[in-house]
Image (spheres, helix red, strand yellow):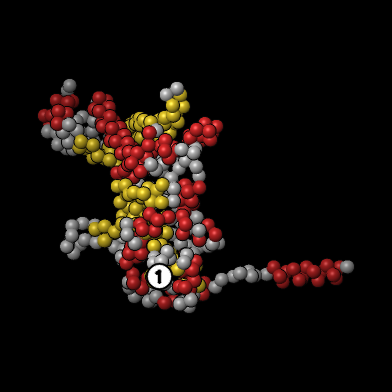
Amino acid sequence: MKKNLLTIILILTILLTGCWDNKDINDLIIVSSMAIDKGENDNLDVTLLCIRPTSQKSSENEKISQNNDVIVFSSGGEDIMDACNKISKKISRNLFFSQMENVLIGEYLARENAAEYLDFFPRHPEPHLKTHIFLTKGNASKIFDNDSSLERNIAQEIDKLKSLNLKAEVQLKDFFISLTEEGIDPIIPLLEITRSGKENTSSTASVASITGAGIFNKSKLVDFIDYDAYRGVLYIQNKIKLGSGTVTFPKDSGGGKITAKVLNNMTKITPILDKDGLSVKIRIKTKAHISENTTKLDLTKSSVINEIDTLFENRIKNLAESAIDKAKNKNCSDVFGFGSIVRGKYPKQWEDQYKKDWKTLLPSLKVSVVCDVDITEIGFDANSLQLKEEDILKQFYK
């Protein structure tokens, strides 16, 4: 009995040793980014930006150009998997998607029906649903034609860009949730290559930039919104973490401009159902500090700070209302998730009254925006550099 037990243990030990599906790194090529465009005859054009294996790079002491740092492969196919299989047949390594950072969707494909062609991602075992997604105007593959002026390659530049300033981070999982959940439509940041300075100068470079966003009506792209409108969407979505804004003082208040940087932002969306029908109230509370002052105002006075607060409140309110007008009113797109919030608070009324005709009711939905800005820091010097000595003394002895 003991011999039989020992034999079984030895056999199990042998079987459990090692990984049956082990993949040798020398047999893989890492896919860093993917661009998906509309092809011919209802096919897709898939372009992969891959990291060149280190064994094929130059020595450590030799400068490596970006052209040697990445390799671009492309192929058409009936779907993403078909196109990737065609690429695999032409190269000596297996495509590896687990470290893919970005997926770029071309405009023509997104306008037709983006969801129809993205089934690859939730089914394939390697790509992460935390992979970030971007839109491009025209074909997405053209982004890969550009070298990065800031990073080793364009994929790294895009990867760092997404978490700066706007915090414009939309992952595949966010896109899929917006597609399948009731009362919300997807929104994807717009990625473009822009010039860093004036044209035709030696120091001007091409850089990847987020210039706005694409708004969807479920699975179809319906319109693009600019940078400011996208900021308005992010304020409403409670996704503004960084960023700054500038307001101009009227001439009767001395003129000049003040720029403030966001320290903290909190947005609350409240659906209200009463005798007047359904409405939505948005309350945005923002804390900020002054980062530049070209006015001649004394920032130590509470009345001055209150006036600055009011100007910034109006600015944020205008951004939010502009976003609401372009998305909800003009394109019948609920990128804010108003319907989802209504469904959460009034589930019975949603099922009985609003669910079926939500897109018809959406443009007429009453939405009010209230902003509360609190300037908590004014910097090291309360006085403007433009103030003359006698002006400072007058303010001091008031």
How far across and down, in percent of the image, does residue 51 sit?
42, 69
| For residue 116, side relative to residue 139 (left or right) | right
Residue at 56 percent across and 71 percent down: it is 23
- Mark 1 Cα within 10 Å, few/some/many (few <14, many 20+)? some
Horizontal side of residue 378 vs 384, given as left or right: right
Residue closest to the eye, 70 or 14? 70
- The front one of 319 and 271 is 271
User: Where does the image place residue 285, in percent across and percent down from the top left?
Assistant: 37, 33
> Where the N terminus falls, by quadrant?
bottom right
Is residue 303 shown above or below 341? above
Determine whether 176 is above or below 106 in the image.
Answer: above
Report the quarter where the C terminus lies: top left
Reading the image, the residue beneath label 1 is 74
Which image quadrant is residue 5 in? Answer: bottom right
**181 horizontally vs 75: left or right:** right
Visible residue check, residue 394: yes
In the displayed orientation, state which residue is furthest to the right: 1
Residue at 39% over, 58% down: 109
Instruction: Count how many numbered circles sit on residues in the image.
Output: 1
Q: Residue at x 25, y 24 (%)?
A: 303
Determine whether the residue tagged by mark 1 lies in a helix, strand or loop: strand
Q: Amino acid at mark 1?
A: Ser
**Residue 311, quarter of picture:** top left
Left/right placement of residue 127 relative to residue 280 reads right
Asked whether residue 50 is in view, the answer is: no
Position in image of residue 169 (x %, y %) = 41, 50
Say which residue appears at 23% left-offset and 33% top-offset. Answer: 382
